Amino acid sequence: MKQKHPRPFVVATFAMTVDGKVTTKNLSPVDFTSREDKLHLFRQRALADAVLIGHTSLKRDNVRLGLPAELQETRVRRGQSRSPLRVIVSNEGRIEDRLNIFQSNISPIVIFSTKRMPRKYQRTLEKKATLHLSNSRCVNLDGMLQTLCEEYKVRTVACEGGPTLFRALLELGLIDQLNLTIAPYMFGGAKAPTLTGVSKKFLPASVHCSLTDVRTVGEECFLTYRIKHQRSLRK
Ligand SMILES: NC(=O)c1ccc[n+]([C@@H]2O[C@H](COP(=O)([O-])OP(=O)(O)OC[C@H]3O[C@@H](n4cnc5c(N)ncnc54)[C@H](OP(=O)(O)O)[C@@H]3O)[C@@H](O)[C@H]2O)c1
């Protein structure tokens, strides 16, 4: 898909079970991957200028989105900041400032949300992050990536989910690479989200994933795909 404006290269990293689930139906934090996979996620995060997360994953997993000291040093040697910019997306904007991410000042935090964010939250969050609040009901993800590119000089984004945000980006043709770990479990359950969430709807167009790398460590498989966007619509 040809882009009208320059935007960063977006790499999504996910782990899923053999039956395609990224979590259980309650969205409770589940630890189903190895130490190697966690390191893999850190390494991918360390490569990017910005790390992007949806509000639900941030809330559920309560992540700081930081990096181990060793990877911070690697970035410094490469001439990058110690840690990538941390970017949160939320339409409603009811983001609690007691979340772990706001207790760490490892890198600046940028929030893309809408004017639906209650004033009380705006007042609290603007002390801890830079807020970009749009007048629309939902965040314009294309516009968000352009802003990251133009105002923050972000060239690469590590998208860490969750599935709802990933699907929205995918539908807009804004995902360029997918790193997918297959973990040796099956969860079952129609209500447990897959990589593209719980929506029963087809994607507007099928997305062709071109396999560029396969690595196996222990019982886990680490796949890398380049995302191609096909024109034909599904019936
Ligand atoms: N296995 C893995 O690799 C992996 C990776 C990531 C996450 N997860 C799991 O996934 C679960 C959460 O997934 P999820 O799909 O429910 O949540 P999500 O994608 O992390 O977040 C959804 C929320 O993000 C905001 N959002 C999403 N799309 C948006 C858009 N287009 N524009 C603006 N804001 C948008 C909205 O926030 P508001 O509601 O605030 O408006 C939305 O409710 C968690 O259980 C987490 O553990 C697993």
Image (spheres, helix red, strand yellow):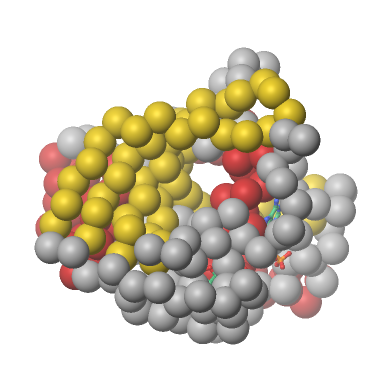
* Image coordinates for residue 35, horizontal then vertical, percent: 19, 69
Residue at x 80% of width, y 52% of height: 138
Q: Is residue 2 above or below residue 83?
A: above
Q: Which quadrant holds residue 234?
A: top right
**Is residue 233 or residue 110 the one in the foreground?**
233
Residue 203, picture quadrant:
top right
Decide if residue 108 is in sight here.
no
Tell whether 55 sits left or right of 13.
right
- x, y percent for residue 37: 25, 62
Q: Left of 173 or right of it: where is 183?
A: left
Which residue occupies 66% across, 53% down?
Answer: 112
Q: Which quadrant holds the N terminus?
A: top right
Q: Is residue 92 left or right of residue 137?
A: left
Report ligand 1 position as a quadrant. Answer: bottom right
For the image shown, how many numbered marks are present on the structure? 0
- Give how far across and how far down residue 183 sits, in percent: 31, 65
Q: Can see residue 75?
A: yes
